[in-house]
């Protein structure tokens, strides 16, 4: 992440060495967290979508801000050896993938470098060893969940993904990284809307009905979710088309979101057919997931990620573990199999209820869950005397809240395991933890999102 807050603060008063409409011949040194190429002019970062590390490109400057610039790729003068023709016809227009034009081994190497660079430049970890990125044998059709916005288009209602950094819909008939059943559910909802004259939601006028077609799949089945602004019209027709078109469909959920915003889900859920929950098996444990709950979207790599975490911790059965940002309790319950006591913290009430039920379903009685923001629950628990042997962190992309980090330092837990989906916030938080007395011992990138710029990392920190 080359546009982190720390860097912007350093550069905010600097006069850019480039101007809008300049033509640059620019060596590309790395990737941002969203897969843009980044080069530098006199130390000033310039982001170029479509450019790859190791390339020399010609680029037209379209923005020259005080902290960084943005340029449009016009020619590749010296290509990365891994540059290939992307297999998806929507690649150049869709914002879902950013790296289909880079072969997969080169993607893994670039993501390792992305993590290493962020830790060095933003975290100050100059000599840290970053392990090779753990990738997939078959990096296609891995996403078990999809959320497709609806919009008016040629031929009627369309579903797809937004173009990069916009809310302009790119209509799709297929997506090579989505589970085929997820795509089938989304297209069935689109065709229902066309047949029943259900108008798509318009963000500018706040008119229309259909907002999103969503689906989540597992080995056990498929759950479809339809998001509308109000009541669900033509319910029986929707049930019929989904049941006829989606193999293994186990449930259909209606979510009502009347808000005049681009937030996907509202607060109201109704199961209109089948079950409102989806069964998922992960690392030998059984989980039941509601439409509102978060679960990693790549099941194969989730097992790689969690098994890597468990291997790094090497729990022996006597430990008390705090799992902060625990979601539905997936890693909490895996930890509970090897620890004496595990405490999960999560602020989404539906996810906490899922976690409690999942603990019961798997016969794990040594896991407890607290429904509260991490920045409130963890300081309270530490103040009341909790001194965990291990703290596991799996925060959202923005990283850990400062109050949660302060509580971790106060707890003096001997070991921390940090699972991160953003190298920049990982580097920032690890720097704070290092300044508080922890040593960053092991960094393992895991490719949870092939063909995108995103990279997950598992890091082990130990108290000095």
Image (cartoon, rainbow, N blue to C red):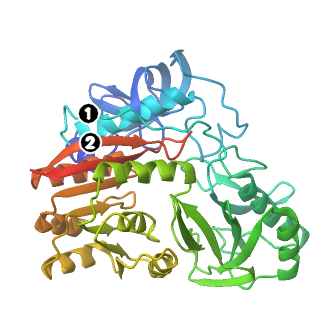
Q: Identify the residue at horizontal 70%, vertical 83% (top origin).
A: 271
The image quadrant that residue 110 belongs to is top left
Distance between the alpha carbons at the discs numbered 1 and 2: 7 Å
- For mark 2, give the secondary structure: strand
Q: Residue furthest front?
A: 317
- Name the residue nearer the viewer: 358 or 88: 358
Sequence-wise first label, 1 or 2: 1
In the picture of the structure, the residue carrying the numbered disc 1 is 129
Q: Nearer the viewer, residue 455 or 344?
A: 344
Where is residue 108 drawn, in percent x and y? 47, 33
Q: Is residue 74 visible?
A: yes
Q: Which residue is the site of mark 2? A: 442
- Image-quadrant location for residue 258: bottom right
Contact (Cβ within 8 Å) of mark 1 with mark 2: yes
Q: Residue at x 17, y 69 (%)?
A: 407
324 to the left or right of 265:
left
Specify whether 308 is left or right of 144. Answer: left
Q: Residue at x 47, y 30 (%)?
A: 21
Q: Residue 65: in sight, yes or no? A: no
């Amino acid at each position: 992440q080359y546009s982190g807050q720390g860097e912007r603060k350093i550069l905010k008063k600097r006069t850019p060495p480039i101007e809008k409409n300049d033509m640059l011949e620019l060596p590309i040194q790395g990737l941002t967290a969203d897969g843009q190429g980044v080069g530098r002019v006199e130390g000033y970062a310039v982001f170029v979508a479509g450019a790859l590390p190791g390339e020399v490109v010609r680029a037209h400057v379209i923005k020259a801000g005080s902290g960084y610039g943005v340029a449009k790729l016009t020619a590749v003068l010296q290509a990365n050896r891994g540059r290939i023709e992307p297999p998806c016809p929507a690649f150049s227009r869709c914002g879902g993938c950013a790296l289909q034009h880079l072969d997969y081994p080169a993607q893994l190497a670039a993501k390792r470098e992305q993590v290493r660079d962020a830790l060095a430049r933003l975290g100050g970890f100059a000599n840290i060893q970053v392990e090779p990125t753990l990738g997939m044998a078959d990096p296609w059709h891995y996403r078990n969940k999809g959320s497709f916005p609806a919009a008016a288009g040629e031929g009627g209602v369309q579903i797809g993904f937004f173009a990069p950094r916009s809310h302009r819909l790119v209509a799709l008939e297929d997506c090579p990284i989505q589970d085929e059943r997820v795509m089938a559910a989304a297209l069935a909802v689109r065709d229902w809307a066309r047949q029943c004259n259900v108008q798509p939601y318009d963000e500018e006028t706040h008119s229309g009905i259909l907002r999103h077609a969503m689906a989540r799949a597992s080995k056990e089945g498929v759950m479809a979710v339809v998001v509308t602004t109000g009541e669900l019209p033509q319910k029986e027709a929707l049930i019929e088309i989904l049941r006829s078109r989606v193999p293994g469909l186990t449930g259909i959920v209606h979510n009502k979101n009347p808000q005049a915003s681009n937030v996907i889900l509202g607060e109201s859920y109704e199961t209109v057919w089948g079950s409102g929950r989806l069964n998922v098996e992960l690392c030998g444990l059984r989980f039941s997931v509601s439409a509102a709950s978060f679960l990693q979207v790549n099941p194969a790599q989730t097992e790689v990620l969690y098994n890597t975490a468990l291997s790094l911790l090497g729990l022996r059965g006597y430990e008390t573990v705090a799992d902060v940002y625990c979601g539905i309790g997936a890693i909490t319950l895996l930890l509970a199999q090897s620890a004496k006591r595990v405490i999960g913290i999560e602020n989404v009430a539906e996810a906490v209820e899922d976690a409690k039920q999942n603990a019961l379903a798997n016969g794990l009685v040594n896991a407890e869950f607290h429904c509260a923001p991490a920045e409130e629950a963890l300081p309270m628990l530490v103040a009341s005397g909790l001194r965990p042997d291990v703290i596991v962190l799996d925060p959202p992309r923005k990283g850990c809240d400062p109050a949660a980090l302060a509580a971790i330092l106060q707890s003096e837990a001997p070991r921390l395991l940090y699972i991160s989906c953003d190298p920049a916030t990982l580097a920032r938080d690890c720097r704070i933890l290092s300044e508080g007395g922890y040593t960053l011992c092991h960094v393992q990138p895991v490719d949870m999102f092939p063909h995108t710029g995103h990279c997950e990392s598992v890091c082990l920190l130990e108290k000095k």
